[in-house]
Image (spheres, rainbow, N blue to C red):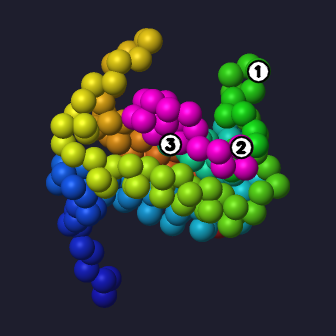
Amino acid sequence: MTARKNLILTPAPATAPEVGVLLAVLHEARADTLKLVAKISDLDAMPERGHSAGTLLYHIAAIELDWLYCEVLQTDFPTQDSEWFPHPVRDKEGHLSAVTNEPLERHLARLSWVRGLLDGVFVSMNLEDFRRVRVLENYDVTPEWVLMHLALHEAHHEGQLALLESLSQPSNA
């Protein structure tokens, strides 16, 4: 008999319940990412088209940090960012920079570090600030939209990771 699933969203602790709901969605996406990555034996394996799992993990963390600091906080990156992100996110042609030869533990620590920064900002954010429009050069954005976008961004890359996971399994032929 299969264990019964608990499909209930429990908002993350936050000053504003609406923030807690979107943080919970983001945390659920991360849990799914981590389950997939744990099944991939070679983070550097490149499919015929696409990116390695290591590259995708680096990208997920980098984009989360970018949205947090550029759009939500509108301030400089923390001083440790160069330690965690020694490679540019994209190469000269605009493709994701290949990130190789990093152990899973390093990727997980990077993801955790960025998520800790993000959670630290959002858990104490009041609803007014959560919905306050940030006016940037090319668009307007709210922190509320940023959390929604980051959840969708991670879910998109989960699909790519799921493909890589399936390719890493021995065929039944």
Give the mark, 3 or 1, whose residue is nearer the N terminus.
3
* Amino acid bearing label 3: Glu
Of mark 3 and mark 2, the one earlier in the sequence is: 3
Q: Secondary structure at mark 2?
A: helix
Rendered location of residue 169, percent (x, y): 66, 64
Left or right of residue 163, residue 89 in this image: right
Name the disc covering residue 82, or none.
2
Give the labeled residue for mark 1.
Answer: 92
- State which mark lies toward you, 3 or 1: 3
Mark earlier in primary sequence (1, 2): 2
Depth check, mark 3 against mark 2: the one in front is 2
Region in magenta: 65-83
Q: Which residue is mark 3?
A: 64
Residue 106, relative to residue 77: is it above or below?
A: below
Q: Position of residue 125 (x, y in %)?
A: 28, 47
Q: Is residue 5 left or right of residue 30?
A: left
The image shows residue 126 at horizontal and vertical percentages of 21, 46
Tags 3 and 2 touching, CB below 8 Å: no
Does the magenta portion include 66? yes
Can you say which quadrant of the picture contains the N terminus? Answer: bottom left
Look at the numbered disc 3 and give the secondary structure of its residue.
Answer: helix
